[in-house]
C-alpha cells in the first residue's frame, strides 16, 4: 500500500476539492461526472484512446480498427416498463460501440450479485440478456460472477464490455463536428429516464411510459451505408441530449443552435416532466442516437433513418455554428432563446 | 418485462433448486460457482468460446486470435498488505488473458462507487491501477463510473475487461491436459487469501502475510518462448489450486496425482491456515500460475520459470494420469493419499 497522496500531489485539485467525497452526481453524466473523468481518471490513466473521450476507444490492432467499450449497470428497479437491467446491459454497450461506427461483435458480462437474490430473478435477467444479444447480433463470450453480502450491492449489478470492428473509411468522433453541420436525433427524447422515474414515484398516466432501450447497431449500419461521412454519433444516455451536445461542442470547439419545437418528445413524457419539474432534454435515453453530419447529407440521412424502426421518428433539430463556440443554444417555441447547459449533478440517479 | 419462467422452463433445475437464492458460495469459485455457470449462464448464452470455459475467450477476428476476458472486484478491505483493489483489478484481468497465452494489451475499467467514498481514496486506488497497468504493459483505454446510494455497494467495486493477442502456434486450453503431463506451479500457494483473511480477522504473525498480487504476462511470455507446446495455463484464484485442477481434470477427462510435500506453501501462510482450519490448497492466489506440460518440457520450463522473479519458487508438484479420470489425488507427507475435492461454497468470501 502506497502512502496517501498529500493534497499537493493531487493532480488537478480545484474542481474536485469542492466535493471531498463522491456524491450521486458523480455518476449522473453531468458536470460532476465530467470533472471526475477530466481531473482524476484522465491524468492517472493518460493515453490517446482514452483522452479521445468517445463512447468507445478505437484501437488499431494488426491493421484493423477495433472499438472497445464498457459500462456498468446499477438501475433500480431491475425490471421496468419496456426493459430490464439485462436488456440495458446489452443495449448500452452495443450502442456505445455503434457510436464509433463499429459493428458490435462480442460482449463480456460480469455480475455482482447480492446474497439472497432469487435464482429465478437471475434466470429472468440472463434470459432477457440472451434475447437482447441475439437481436443485437452480438455474442456473450466471457463472464464473471461475484457475490456480496446481503445489504451490500442492490440485488444485481451488471457490467458489460464489448468489442466490434470499425469498417474502413469511417471516421467518427466527438471532435469532428464542423460549423454548418446538421444535428439529427433518431426519435423522441427522455423516454427511458421517465419510464424509470414513473415506476419509482408510482406515477400513473393514461399510457405507461416505456423505456426506449434498444440496440442501435442496425440503424447505424444503414446510416453509414448511405452516408459514410457522418462526423459524430452519440447515444444521449445519462445527462440526455444536453450533456451529449455540450460535450461535443467542447470537444469540437463549436456551438450548437437547436430549434426546440422540432425536438421530438412524447406527449406523456412531456407531461411527466412538467409534473416533476424536469427538462426532457436532460433526461436519459437508451435507444436513441444523435447524428452530426455535413449539411449535404442531412436530408438523405433523415430519410434513411426513418425507414428503420429505431429511427421512424427521426428529426433534424438544429445545426452547428461558429458564432458561440462551446455553447448549446435552443430557440424556444415562443421565439426566445435559452442556453442549454449540462446539469451539475443528477436529475435522476441510478437510471442505467 | 417478460413473465417469470415457470419451474418447468428452468434450464437444468436440479442442482440450482437446492439453493433457490444466491448464497455467498455462488461467488467463491467452488462447486456452487461452477453450477451457476453450467446450469444458468451457459444454457442462456450458449456459444463455443464461452463453453470452452477458459480464463478468457479466444476469438478469431480478421485472421488474428484475440483473447477477451472480464472480472469484477469486490474485495474487502480495499487496501491490504501487498496490494489493493486497484492493483488486483489490473492483475486479475491481465493474468486471465495471459492464461490463454495472450500478450495482454488493453483494459477497460468500470467503477461502481458508493456515495460518500472519499475522492482521495479513489485517487489512491486509481494511482495504484495506473502503476500496475504500466508494470503489466497494458493501457486502460476506456471506462465508466456509476454511483450508488450510501449503504449500497461497499465503497468501490471495479470491473476490468481486457484484450490481448494470442501469438500464432500457441494452443492453450483447459481441455488439453494429457495423461503423463507434468504439473508445475510458479510459487507458494495461498498467500493472497490469507493476507486478506489476516487483515479481516486481525491476526498477527511474526511476519505480515503479503498478497502475491502480480502480473504474470512477462512470465508467460518467457515460458512460451522456451516451450510453445504448453498444454494448460491457469491462475489458481478463487478456490485455489484444488478448484483449478478439478476443473482441468473435468474438462480434459483425466486425473491428477500430486506430491503434497512438493507444493510450496509459505510457513507463515501454513501456520495461519492451521490456526483457522483452512487448507492452503483451496485458498486464492493472485500472482501464481499452474502449468500443465508434456513431460519432455518440464525440466526446461522449470528452469525458465525460476529465472523470472514471478517464478523463482516454481516447483514440479505432480502429473496427469488416466488411472482415475476427473479425480485429483494428493500423496501426503506421511505416505497416505487424499482426494482433493473442490469446496462447495466459500472458504473466504470477497477476496478479489
Image: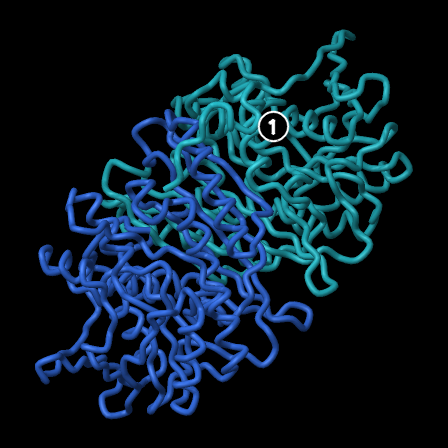
Chain colours: A cyan, B blue
In the picture, measured across the screen, residue A293 lies left or right of residue B317, that is right
Query: For the point 17% across and 51% down, which residue is it?
Result: B206
Of all chains, the one bearing label 1 is A
In the picture, measured across the screen, residue B26 lies left or right of residue A263, that is left
Query: For the point 68% across and 54% down, which residue is it?
Result: A59
The residue most toward the right is A296
Residue B305 vertical placement versus A327 (above, below): below
Asked whether B251 or A14 is in front, the reply is: A14
Q: Where does the image place residue A235, in percent across and percent down from the top left?
A: 64, 37
- Residue behind mark 1: A240
Q: Where does the image place residue A221, in percent across and percent down from the top left?
A: 73, 52
The image quadrant where one finds the N terminus of chain A is top left
Q: Where does the image place residue B218, in percent across and percent down from the top left?
A: 50, 65
Q: Quadrant of residue B147?
A: top left
Q: Where does the image place residue A58, in percent across and percent down from the top left?
A: 68, 50
Residue B21 shows in this picture: no
Disc 1 packing (10 Å; few <14; some 14–19; many ≥20): many
Residue A116 vertical placement versus B325 (above, below): above
Q: Quadrant of residue B344?
A: bottom left
Query: For the point 81% across and 17% down, which residue is it?
Result: A324
In the picture, measured across the screen, residue A6 lies left or right of residue A215, that is left
Residue B54 shows in this picture: yes
Q: Quadrant of residue B288?
A: bottom left
In the picture, measured across the screen, residue A262 lies left or right of residue A27, that is right
Query: For the point 64% across and 44% down, which residue is it?
Result: A47
Amino acid at each position: 500500500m502506497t502512502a496517501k497522496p498529500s493534497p499537493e500531489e493531487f493532480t488537478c485539485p480545484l474542481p474536485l476539492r469542492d466535493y471531498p467525497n463522491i456524491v450521486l452526481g458523480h455518476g449522473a453524466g453531468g458536470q460532476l461526472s465530467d470533472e471526475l473523468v477530466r481531473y482524476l481518471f484522465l491524468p492517472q490513466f493518460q493515453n490517446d484512446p482514452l483522452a479521445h473521450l468517445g463512447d468507445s476507444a478505437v484501437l488499431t490492432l494488426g491493421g484493423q480498427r477495433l472499438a472497445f467499450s464498457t459500462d456498468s449497470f446499477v438501475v433500480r428497479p431491475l425490471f421496468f416498463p419496456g426493459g430490464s437491467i439485462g436488456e440495458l446491459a446489452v443495449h448500452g454497450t452495443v450502442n456505445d460501440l455503434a457510436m464509433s461506427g463499429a459493428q458490435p461483435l462480442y460482449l463480456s458480462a460480469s455480475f455482482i450479485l447480492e446474497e439472497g437474490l432469487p435464482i429465478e430473478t437471475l434466470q429472468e435477467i440472463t434470459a432477457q440478456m440472451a434475447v437482447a444479444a441475439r437481436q443485437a447480433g452480438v455474442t456473450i463470450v466471457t463472464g464473471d460472477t461475484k457475490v456480496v453480502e446481503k445489504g451490500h450491492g442492490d440485488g444485481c449489478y451488471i457490467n458489460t464490455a464489448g468489442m466490434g470492428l470499425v469498417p474502413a473509411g469511417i471516421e467518427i468522433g466527438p471532435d469532428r463536428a464542423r460549423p454548418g453541420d446538421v444535428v439529427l436525433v433518431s426519435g423522441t427524447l427522455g423516454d427511458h429516464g421517465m419510464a424509470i422515474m414513473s415506476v419509482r414515484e408510482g406515477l400513473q398516466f393514461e399510457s405507461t411510459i416505456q423505456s426506449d432501450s434498444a440496440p442501435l447497431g442496425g440503424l447505424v449500419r444503414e446510416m453509414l451505408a448511405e452516408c459514410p461521412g457522418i462526423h459524430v454519433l452519440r447515444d444521449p444516455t445519462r445527462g440526455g441530449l444536453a450533456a451529449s451536445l455540450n460535450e461535443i461542442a467542447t470537444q469540437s470547439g463549436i456551438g450548437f443552435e437547436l430549434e426546440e419545437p422540432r425536438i421530438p418528445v412524447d406527449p406523456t413524457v412531456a407531461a411527466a416532466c412538467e409534473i416533476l419539474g424536469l427538462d426532457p432534454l436532460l433526461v436519459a435515453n437508451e435507444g436513441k442516437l444523435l447524428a452530426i453530419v455535413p449539411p449535404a447529407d442531412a436530408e438523405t440521412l433523415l430519410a434513411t433513418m426513418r425507414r428503420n424502426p429505431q429511427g421512424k421518428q427521426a428529426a433534424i433539430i438544429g445545426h452547428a455554428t461558429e458564432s458561440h463556440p462551446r455553447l448549446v443554444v435552443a430557440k424556444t417555441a415562443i421565439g426566445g432563446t435559452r442556453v442549454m447547459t449540462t446539469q451539475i449533478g443528477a436529475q435522476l440517479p441510478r437510471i442505467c
